[in-house]
Amino acid sequence: MKQTFAEKIALAQDFLPINGTDYIEFYVGNAKQAAHFYKTAFGFQSEAYAGPETGVRDRASYVLRQGKIRLVLTTALRSDHLISEHVKKHGDGLKILALWVDDATKAFEETTKRGAQVYQEPQVLSDEYGEAVTSGIYTYGETVHLFVERKNYNGVFLPGYQAWESDYQPEEVGLLYIDHCVGNVGWNKMNETVEWYQQVMGFVNVLSFDDKQINTEYSALMSKVMSNGNGYVKFPINEPAEGQKKSQIEEYLEFYEGEGVQHAALATKDIVKTVKELKARGVEFLGAPPEAYYDMLPDRVGQIDEEIKIIQDLGILVDRDDEGYLLQIFTKPVEDRPTLFFEIIQRKGAQSFGAGNFKALFEAIEREQAKRGNL
C-alpha cells in the first residue's frame, strides 16, 4: 500500500525538534532599497531594524514580516566585510535559513557531533526584553542553518534590533508562511546532500524525482525532498542531469558561482487574489504554459474549485496527488543574475510538489534562458 506523506515523515529520526522556519536572511548590496522592493512588490511589513543607530557598526539589517514569514535583508557597511565578499561573489542571495528550536545549544551539539561544520558556536543575546540563544552550521555551499531559541525573549525580533516604524506600509498580499526552500547543488552532489540531511539533521527523504521524470527536449534535473519529523520544514534538493543543452540548475550554479538556495515557496490561501495583487504591483512571473495544458487540466487533475479560465489568464499551474491538489506559480528571478526566485503556492490537501507541472514549468524557464543566451 502506498505511503502517505505523513507516514513517510514519521520515519524521520527527529532527534532535532524544529518548530518551523524562524526567518530567512538575504545578503544584499543595498538592504534599504531591497526592503522597499519587498514592501512595495510583495506586501511585506516593516518589523525591526539593526544598524549603526542601534549599536551595530558593521552592517545594516531590515526585518520584514507577512503572516508567519520573516525576511531579513542585510548589507555590510564596508567593502572588506565577509558579507560584501559574499555579495561580490554570489550577487544578492539567500544566505541563512534560520530554524526555530526550543534549545539552540542542544541543536548545535546534536548536529555537530554528527559531522556538521560549525558556522557559529551557541551565543546568548540579551536586552531588556529577555534573552535569545542562536547557533549555526553550514549546509550546502555557503548556506547556513541558524538555530534560534526565543522562548525567553519578548522583544520585536532579536536583541540588537529595534522596532522599525514606517509611514509607508503597503497592504499585504495574503502570504502566510514558508512552505519550502529549494537548494541547488553541483553535479553528483544530491545524494551526498540528502545523506547529510539524514545523518546530521535527522530528516527523511519523502519524495524523489529522477531525470526521466523531470526533463524537456533540451535539459533535465534530479530532485529529492527532505523533511523534518513534523513536516514543518522541507528542503527539496536539486542537481543537474545530462541533457542536450544547459539546464536551469547549471545556469544557476554558473551565475551564483556555487551551490545555494534556488527559491523559496510562499504559501497563500487564495492564490488567485495573491497573484492578481502581485502582478498589479509589478512582480513578473514566468510565461503561462500553452493552451493545451489547460485544455487537458480537467482530465489530468479532475474537479477543482477555481475557474480554469481565471487561472489560465494568470498562468497558474495545477497538480494533484492522492491527498488533494495544489496550485502554484513561479516568479522570474528577482535580480539581474538568473538565480533566486519565488514560488507562490496554495495547497488544497496535496502534500507533493507539483510533479505533473515539471515539464510545463521547465519549458517556461528554458524560454527565459534562451532569451538570456544561456540555454
Image (cartoon, rainbow, N blue to C red):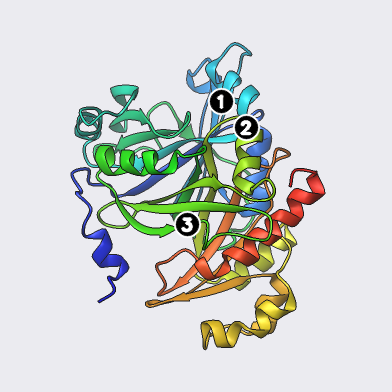
In this rendering, which labeled residue sits more in front, label 2 or label 3? Answer: 3
Residue 296 falls in image quadrant:
bottom right
Which residue lies under the disc numbered 1? 60
Q: Residue at x 52, y 74 (%)?
A: 319
Labels 1 and 2: the sequence-earlier one: 2
| CA neighbours of label 3 inside 10 A, class few (<14), some (14 to 19), many (20+) | some
**Quadrant (top left, top right, bottom left, bottom right) of the N terminus:** bottom left
| Amino acid type for the residue under numbered disc 3 | Asp
The residue nearer to you, when weighing 156 against 299, is 299
Q: CA distance from mark 1 to mark 2?
A: 7 Å
Vertical order, 317 against 81 (above or below): below
Q: CA distance from mark 3 to mark 1?
A: 42 Å
Inspect this view and state whether residue 6 appears: yes
Labels 2 and 3: the sequence-earlier one: 2
Which residue lies under the disc numbered 3? 210
User: Dot 1 lies on which element?
Assistant: strand
Labels 3 and 1: the sequence-earlier one: 1
User: Dot 2 lies on which element?
Assistant: helix
Inspect this view and state whether residue 156 appears: no
Q: Is residue 340 left or right of residue 184?
A: right
Which residue lies under the disc numbered 2? 31
Q: Are marks 1 and 2 in contact (CB under 8 Å)?
A: yes
Q: Residue at x 21, y 37 (%)?
A: 103
Q: Are marks 3 and 1 in contact (CB under 8 Å)?
A: no
User: Dot 3 lies on which element?
Assistant: loop
